[in-house]
Image: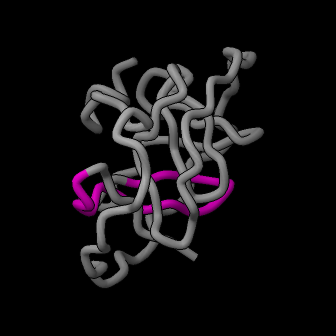
Amino acid sequence: MLLPLFDKDCEHAGWLDPGKYIYDADMNFIAFIINSNAWSVETGNWLGPVQGLLCYDTNGKLMFWNPKEKITGTVKAPRPSRQILSTKPQTPAKPAEPAKPASPKCNANVWSDLSLWGWLSQ
């Protein structure tokens, strides 16, 4: 089941297939998840930890969130061993555009300064 991901401005940034894949808002396959870490499809580089429905950058700052998940702060994690995607998933049908959520109640310093494309280029 795909769940929407939002950025710090509560703008729809993409879709998460929990524990498996991340797609951008246009359903382009951009990252895969192995052992609670996101990896770029394009470069194979580590993008950062994924905890539940929260995606972080490599510095432990929050990139994307889903309103079903409570934001608890930053998660600084050691760089894991490189992973390789064994098979590319088929592109799922695009769900309906999600409603914009209310701003999460959290400290402003938990957010990454990276854009989606900056995150993918780490």
Whether the magenta-drawn stretch holds residue 21 is answered as: yes
Seen at 29% across and 29% down, the residue is 114
Seen at 30% across and 49% down, the residue is 8
Whether the magenta-drawn stretch holds residue 55 is answered as: no
Q: Left or right of 28: which side holds 46?
A: right
Q: Position of residue 25 (x, y in %)?
A: 28, 60
15 or 70: nearer the viewer: 70
Q: Left or right of 119: which side holds 51?
A: right
Q: Position of residue 119 (x, y in %)?
A: 36, 29
**Quadrant of the rendered structure where residue 112 is?**
top left
Seen at 63% across and 43% down, the residue is 33
What's the coloring here?
Answer: one colour
Q: Left or right of 6: which side holds 83?
A: right
**Quadrant of the rendered structure where residue 95 is?**
bottom left
**Quadrant of the rendered structure where residue 49 is?**
top right
Q: Position of residue 28 (x, y in %)?
A: 33, 53
100 or 86: nearer the viewer: 100
Quadrant including the C terminus: top left
Seen at 27% across and 81% down, the residue is 99
34 or 112: nearer the viewer: 112
Give the tally of numbered discs: 0
Query: What span is colored magenta in the figure?
Result: 9-23
Q: Position of residue 57 (x, y in %)?
A: 47, 29
Question: Is 26 drawn above or below residue 119 in the view shown?
Answer: below
Quadrant including the N terminus: bottom right
